[in-house]
Image: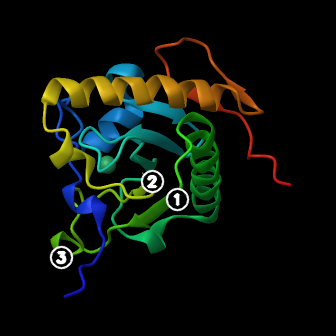
């Protein structure tokens, strides 16, 4: 039997919500200023990059548009383009920071059947893959090791985003600010 590859089925981002006014954790992180604590590693005008707290593999990130919607058709052109540019920058940062062999990237839309745990605020998963890799979580089930791995990945990706053109770092504990679309060849 063929199995459908869907690492985002174990999407898990339950965390303390520091903003009691926001029911949605992604909206709370959009507004929040504790970027390192929240694992928000980069921010553009209309989206941000969040490390998954429960990664399928090291470097598993989510690219989250600011708009609180589960409907892809509701994103306006400006947001769609900004979100796509931020994905391009993610691939570049992961390449520089972790050097995987390949990637899976995708959205879960339409509720629990798609396997996501937060379906009212859409987000794109980007999962680095290595030859012969297996689900990182069952292999590394020690919580402390996973937390350390996510912190290490945060540093690597923060450095990688900061090294890209047209980015600004105001504070090592704040997300890297993306100032312009990525330069393409
Ligand atoms: Zn939201």
Closer to viewer: mark 3 or mark 1: 1
* Direction from residue 79 to residue 36 in the image, left or right: left
Q: Earlier in the sequence, mark 2 or mark 3?
A: 3
User: Which SS class for mark 2?
Assistant: loop
* Direction from residue 153 to residue 141 in the image, left or right: left
User: Which SS class for mark 1?
Assistant: strand
- Picture disc at residue 67: none
User: Which quarter of the image is occupied by the N terminus?
Assistant: bottom left
Quadrant for residue 72, please give it.
Answer: bottom left
Q: CA distance from mark 2 to mark 3?
A: 27 Å
In the displayed orientation, state which residue is furthest to the top: 171
**Residue nearest the viewer, comparing 119 with 127:** 127
- Rendered residue at 59%/50% (across/down): 91
Quadrant for residue 164, please give it.
Answer: top right
Q: Is residue 10 above or below residue 14?
A: below
| Position in image of residue 77 (x %, y %) | 63, 65
| Position in image of residue 70 (x %, y %) | 33, 65
Q: Earlier in the sequence, mark 3 or mark 1?
A: 1
Residues at marks 2 and 3 touching, judged by CB atoms closer than 8 Å: no
- Picture disc at residue 130: 2
Characterize the local packing of mark 1: few (<14), some (14-19) or many (20 or more) Cα atoms within 10 angstroms.
few
**Residue nearest the viewer, comparing 27 with 112:** 112
Q: Which residue is mark 1?
A: 102
Quadrant for residue 118, please give it.
Answer: bottom left
Q: CA distance from mark 2 to mark 1?
A: 6 Å
Badge 3 residue CB within 8 Å of ligand 1: no
Q: CA distance from mark 3 to mark 1?
A: 26 Å
Q: Is residue 153 above or below residue 14?
A: above
Q: Is residue 40 above or below residue 61?
A: above
- Picture disc at residue 113: 3
Characterize the local packing of mark 2: few (<14), some (14-19) or many (20 or more) Cα atoms within 10 angstroms.
few
In the displayed orientation, state which residue is furthest to the bottom: 1
């Amino acid at each position: 039997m063929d199995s459908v590859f869907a690492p985002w089925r174990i999407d898990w981002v339950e965390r303390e919500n520091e903003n009691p006014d926001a029911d949605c954790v992604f909206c709370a992180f959009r507004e929040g200023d504790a970027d390192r604590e929240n694992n928000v590693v980069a921010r553009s005008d209309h989206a941000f990059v969040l490390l998954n707290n429960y990664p399928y593999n090291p470097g598993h990130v989510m690219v989250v548009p600011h708009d609180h919607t589960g409907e892809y058709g509701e994103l306006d052109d400006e947001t769609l383009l900004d979100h796509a540019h931020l994905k391009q920058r993610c691939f570049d940062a992961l390449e520089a920071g972790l050097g995987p062999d390949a990637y899976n990237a995708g959205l879960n839309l339409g509720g629990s059947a798609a396997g996501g745990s937060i379906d009212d605020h859409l987000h794109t998963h980007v999962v680095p893959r290595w030859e012969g890799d297996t689900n990182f979580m069952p292999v590394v089930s020690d919580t402390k090791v996973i937390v350390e791995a996510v912190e290490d990945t945060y540093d690597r990706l923060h450095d990688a985003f900061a090294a890209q053109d047209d980015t600004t770092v105001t504070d090592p504990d704040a997300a890297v600010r993306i100032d312009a679309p990525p330069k393409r060849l």
